[in-house]
Image (cartoon, grey):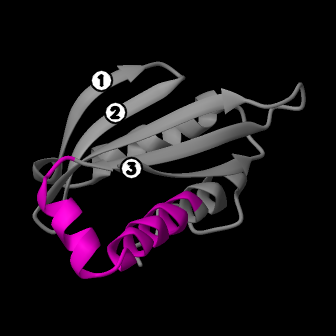
Amino acid sequence: MSIEKAFAIQAPREAIWDALWSDLAAGDTSLYNLEGSTWPKQLLLKVDMSGMPCLLTYTLTPMDAAGSTEVAASLEPLSKRYGLYYLVTFGHIKRNYEMLLVEGLANLKAHVEGDGPQGIVEP
């Protein structure tokens, strides 16, 4: 059960890729594993979301000649516990993960477009 959100960012995908890599380099490497990357199209990370292993995928797709890029973030919980939590919370757990994706993409957009601080902001 994959959860996906997408944002349009006014920057070439190479600039977005560099921002993602610099954020990863500054982060705690014990919290993620690089599962795969295809420069500058796709980045796959295995992350731990409060004990729930998930696959986080960023896909960067050029939108137009002006240099805009669609950044799609997909989060796929890898644990069978997610299905149980989904049932117990009547689907509310999905909303929490959706909010995490939206906040992360909003921070990335602000950083790359220059509307935010010079680093990805923690919630």
Identity of the residue drawn at 72% across and 47% down: 9
Task: Find numbered disc 1 in the image and state the secondary structure of the residue it sits on.
Answer: strand
| Residue behind mark 1 | 36
23 or 65, which is in the foreground? Answer: 65
Q: Gap in Å between the C-alphas at discs 2 and 3? A: 14 Å
Identity of the residue drawn at 14% across and 52% down: 79
Task: Find numbered disc 3 in the image and state the secondary structure of the residue it sits on.
Answer: helix
Q: Count neighbours of disc 1 (C-alpha within 10 A) and say few if under 14, some if 14 to 19, many if 20 or more.
A: few
Q: Count neighbours of disc 2 (C-alpha within 10 A) and say few if under 14, some if 14 to 19, many if 20 or more.
A: some
Q: Count neighbours of disc 3 (C-alpha within 10 A) and say few if under 14, some if 14 to 19, many if 20 or more.
A: some
Identity of the residue drawn at 37% across and 22% down: 37
| Residue behind mark 2 | 44
Task: Find numbered disc 2 in the image and state the secondary structure of the residue it sits on.
Answer: strand
Residue 23 circle label: 3
Instruction: Give the extent of the magenta segment.
Output: 78-105
Please determine whether, in this image, residue 97 is positioned above or below residue 41: below
Q: Left or right: 20 with respect to 93?
A: right
Does residue 86 show up magenta in the picture? yes
In percent of width and height, residue 11 lies at 73, 40
